[in-house]
Amino acid sequence: MSLLSIVVPCYNEEETVSLFYQAVTPVLAGMNIDHEIIFVNDGSRDRTLEECLKLYNAHPEEIKVIDFSRNFGKEGALLAGLRQAKGDYVTVMDADLQDPPEVLVRMFELMEKNDDDVVGSRRVTRKGEPPIRSWFARMFYKLINKYTEVEIVDGARDFRLMKRSVVDAILSLKEYGRFSKGLFAWVGFKTEYIEYENVERVAGETKWSFWKLLRYAMDGIVEYTEAPLRLPFWCGGFLTVLMTVELLVLLVMALCGKVITTGVLIISLVLFFGGVLLLGIGVLGEYLSKTYNEVKGRPNYIVKKLYD
């Protein structure tokens, strides 16, 4: 019988871990497949680890727990879970039940029907999200899809069902800076998406503040497009042409006897060019910081203890 691995990254999810297990167990019972659930405690500061260990002690044959030495972020937790997963099929789910377990059944049916390698999920609405966050999310997907070689589907979640070959391909990518939505798209394979309405958290509070999401979006842009590197070049070229035209106009005006006040103009130009230079240096700094992290060769996470 095939094995399904369920990877569940957890950060301060003491209220949702047991609820997740109670919700996913009936769904798995109705599926003709063996399974393992891998909880990854990403340095939680509450009783998340204790709640995970309660389930592990009660069901050691189906549950694994990976405990990090500190908080390394969801990308590190997801990577650790994928590395530990042994299944012929692997899925990633949030502990807060925003990824409905019953969708797993539809994923398997669609994968078997169309011989897909990946069946992903995407939200058709962002009901419940602050309007400003929804607007920035839409703008992010428009921007990144305009300048990248792969399409990152708007509303796509990490919740997806993958065959073993897809997981092995993702694990073969060795970069330190990981943006999973981009990695899932970059490896390719035949992929379809199941749409569903946005689901609110079953308990607890979201760990993704606006600034964390903005930082995550910036990581995705820097990791998957070179457009920001080209931006200073095009801005510089445009401004050079513009300033050349302006100088020619000033020269003609001077020859015609016009009085030109240059003080304010010079100060404005210096400040403007200074801002453009700082912008270009900032963009280069983002890419250099990514290169710096890659060169250091540090691991994405450190496992304090594995309960298996």
Image (cartoon, rainbow, N blue to C red):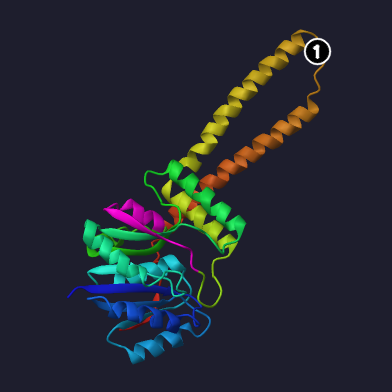
**Residue 85 in view (yes/no):** no
Q: Residue furthest left?
A: 1
Residue for badge 1: 258
Magenta region: 181-199
Q: Label 1 sits on what residue type?
A: Lys
Asked whether, in this view, residue 170 is left or right of residue 219, the answer is left
Asked whether, in this view, residue 263 is left or right of residue 129, the answer is right
Please state, as top left, top right, bottom left or bottom right, where the C terminus lies in the image: bottom left
The percent position of residue 183, horizontal first and vertical second, equals 36, 56
Q: Is residue 285 magenta?
A: no
Q: Is residue 185 magenta?
A: yes
**Residue 130 in view (yes/no):** yes
For label 1, the SS is: loop
| Position of 292 relative to 73 (above/below) | above
The structure residue drawn at horizontal position 30% and vertical position 62%, both measured from the top left corner, is 171
The percent position of residue 101, horizontal first and vertical second, equals 37, 72
Q: Residue furthest bottom?
A: 58
Please state, as top left, top right, bottom left or bottom right, where the N terminus lies in the image: bottom left
The structure residue drawn at horizontal position 22% and vertical position 69%, both measured from the top left corner, is 88
The quadrant holding residue 169 is bottom left
| Position of 123 relative to 199 (above/below) | above
Asked whether, in this view, residue 292 is left or right of residue 117, the answer is right
- Foreground residue, 248 or 31? 31
The structure residue drawn at horizontal position 39% and vertical position 47%, both measured from the top left corner, is 151
- Foreground residue, 301 or 219? 219
The quadrant holding residue 167 is bottom left
The percent position of residue 203, horizontal first and vertical second, equals 53, 78
| Position of 199 relative to 255 (above/below) | below
The percent position of residue 37, horizontal first and vertical second, equals 33, 78
The quadrant holding residue 109 is bottom left
Number of residues whose C-alpha sits closer than 10 Å to that of mark 1, classed few (under 14), some (14–19) or many (20 or more): few
